[in-house]
């Protein structure tokens, strides 16, 4: 019978106290789960299940034969989207090598998939759910690793942080010209969402992104030209979101 991975129980205990028990949606999957990290190896009949293919997962299955290694986090708390953006960026920077995958929504509308096997690049997710909750799975060989830093680190980060390095190009929109696309655009859009603006983190700098940039620049006494250059970029990331 599957059981909670001890390290994810530590994450739950921290989350319960920090953001509230109501935002814990589960570790062990219900009877509708037939595969994946929400089940311990003991409940997976298919030996080729994707959660059992890597060397790390195979080794973990021997050590922790009943441990379910996925966590569902509700996104009903105020800083949840900012936390998700922080978590993805930390994973991309190698801070959490135990994370296998993340499924969630950076903007509360569109769903994204981030795989540790592919460097946590942004991929579209077409499955059900995962807008109102974020799924995190960890490699099975880390079942007993304390995973509370996946949330604890967000709340303990310094109040003042350095902005991510300016990407080297100015983000701008002009009618009739090809729209700028890329992860730098998506990162900036995600930051704006975390600051309370309404737009999609689709990685495309269009008229809505430009409008948000103008409003942000006006609020901060910057040249309101709708272009995200080095000064606007730095200002966008200058303050930690509580």
Image (cartoon, rainbow, N blue to C red):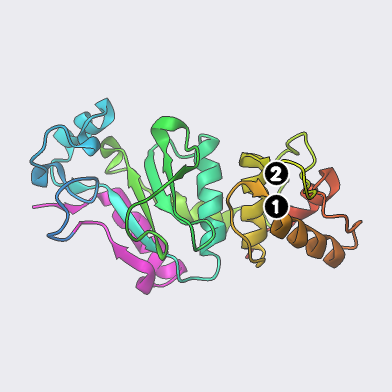
> Residue 78: percent from the left, percent from the top?
54, 70
> Label 2 belongs to which residue?
179
Give the residue at x 41% y 72%. 20
Q: Which element type, helix, strand or loop, lies under badge 2?
A: loop
Could you classify mark 2 by the number of other residues whose Cα lies within 10 Å: few (under 14), some (14-19), or many (20 or more)? some
The stretch in magenta equals 1-29
Quarter holding residue 17: bottom left
Task: Identify the residue at the far front of this view.
Answer: 176
Judge left or right: residue 14 versus residue 160: left
> Label 1 belongs to which residue?
206
Measured Cα–Cα span from mark 1 to mark 2: 6 Å
Residue 231 shown in magenta: no
The answer to the question of whether label 1 and label 2 lie on touching residues, with beta carbons closer than 8 A, is yes
Judge left or right: residue 145 versus residue 241: left
> Residue 214: percent from the left, percent from the top?
82, 61
Quarter holding residue 99: top left
> Residue 102: percent from the left, percent from the top?
40, 47
Earlier in the chain: of badge 1 and badge 2, it is 2
Examine the rendered structure and indicate whether residue 78 appears above or below residue 158. Answer: below
Which of the pair 146/215 is nearer the observer?
A: 215
Residue 2 shown in magenta: yes
């Amino acid at each position: 019978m599957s059981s909670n991975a001890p390290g994810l129980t530590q994450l739950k205990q921290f989350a319960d106290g920090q953001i509230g028990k109501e935002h814990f949606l589960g570790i062990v999957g219900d009877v509708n789960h037939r595969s994946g990290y929400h089940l311990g190896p003991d409940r997976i009949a298919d030996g080729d299940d994707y959660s059992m293919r890597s060397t790390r997962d195979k080794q973990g299955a021997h050590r922790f034969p009943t441990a379910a290694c996925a966590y569902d986090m509700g996104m009903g708390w105020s800083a949840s989207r900012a936390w998700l953006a922080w978590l993805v960026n930390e994973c991309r920077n190698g801070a959490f090598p135990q994370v296998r995958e993340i499924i969630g929504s950076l903007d509360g509308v569109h769903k994204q998939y981030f795989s540790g096997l592919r460097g946590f690049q942004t991929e579209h997710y077409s499955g059900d759910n995962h807008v109102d909750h974020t799924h995190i799975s960890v490699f099975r060989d880390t079942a007993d690793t304390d995973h509370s830093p996946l949330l604890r680190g967000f709340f303990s980060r310094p109040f003042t942080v350095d902005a991510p390095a300016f990407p080297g190009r100015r983000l701008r929109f002009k009618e009739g010209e090809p729209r700028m696309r890329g992860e730098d655009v998506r990162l900036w859009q995600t930051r704006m969402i975390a600051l309370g603006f309404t737009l999609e983190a689709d990685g495309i700098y269009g008229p809505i992104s430009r409008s948000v940039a103008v409003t942000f620049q006006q609020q901060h006494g910057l040249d309101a030209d709708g272009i995200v250059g080095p000064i606007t970029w730095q200002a966008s990331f200058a303050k930690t979101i509580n």
